[in-house]
Image (cartoon, rainbow, N blue to C red):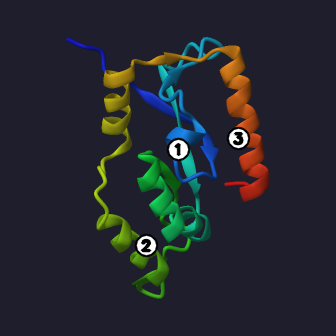
Amino acid sequence: MRERVRYVRNFTYADVNTLAACPVMPYQDPERPYVRAWFASSEGADLEAFNRCLGEAEQDRLETEGGACIMYTHFASGFWSDGELNQRFRELMQRLACKNGWFVPVTPLLDHLVQHRGLMVLTPAQRRALERRWLRSKIRAGPS
């Protein structure tokens, strides 16, 4: 029986294209051997960050780049107010749903990447690059 890979989220980036921000995901980190596989996500911790990350231009760019977005969010952070779902969020989700995307939970997406590319082993240089990209992203987008 094949061992199921368990994934743990590590970095969160302001870029809608999570694969562009972290092209090595999912990956193993030899400096963190107790986690089998790591992955990154796109920043959408609250309503404002989510809507900014998945705006119309960002959706179009994600589609053009053929990328993937793994959105980190807390739906309790402003998405629902006074008994209604935020209108802008609803519009963006309806627009996104009309695109020719593959909309799946994170595990099937990561399993698909592992099946087609293998589980990457992070090098020290790649770790430094991811950390620098994450720091720049945090400076631009703010904390999650």
Query: Which is nearer the N-term, disc 2 or disc 1?
Result: 1
Do the CB atoms of the residues marked 1 and 3 lie less than 8 Å apart? no
Q: Position of residue 14 (x, y in %)?
A: 63, 53
Q: Quadrant of the C terminus?
A: bottom right
- Marks 2 and 1 sit apart, C-alpha to C-alpha, by 18 Å
- Inspect this view and state whether residue 55 appears: no
- Marks 1 and 3 sit apart, C-alpha to C-alpha, by 11 Å
Q: Quadrant of the N terminus?
A: top left
The amino acid at mark 2 is: Leu
Do the CB atoms of the residues marked 2 and 3 lie less than 8 Å apart? no
Do the CB atoms of the residues marked 2 and 1 lie less than 8 Å apart? no
Could you tell me which secondary element the residue under label 3 belongs to? helix
Q: Which mark is residue 18?
A: 1
Instruction: Give the residue pinned by disc 3.
Output: 134
Which residue is located at x 68 percent, y 23 percent? 127
* 114 or 57: nearer the viewer: 57
Instruction: Give the residue pinned by disc 2.
Output: 92
Which residue is located at x 51 percent, y 23 percent? 27
Q: Position of residue 39 (x, y in %)?
A: 51, 33
Disc 3: CA contacts within 10 A as few (<14), some (14-19) or many (>=20) = some
The amino acid at mark 3 is: Trp
The amino acid at mark 1 is: Thr
Determine which quarter of the picture holds residue 2.
Answer: top left
Which residue is located at x 41 percent, y 86 percent? 83
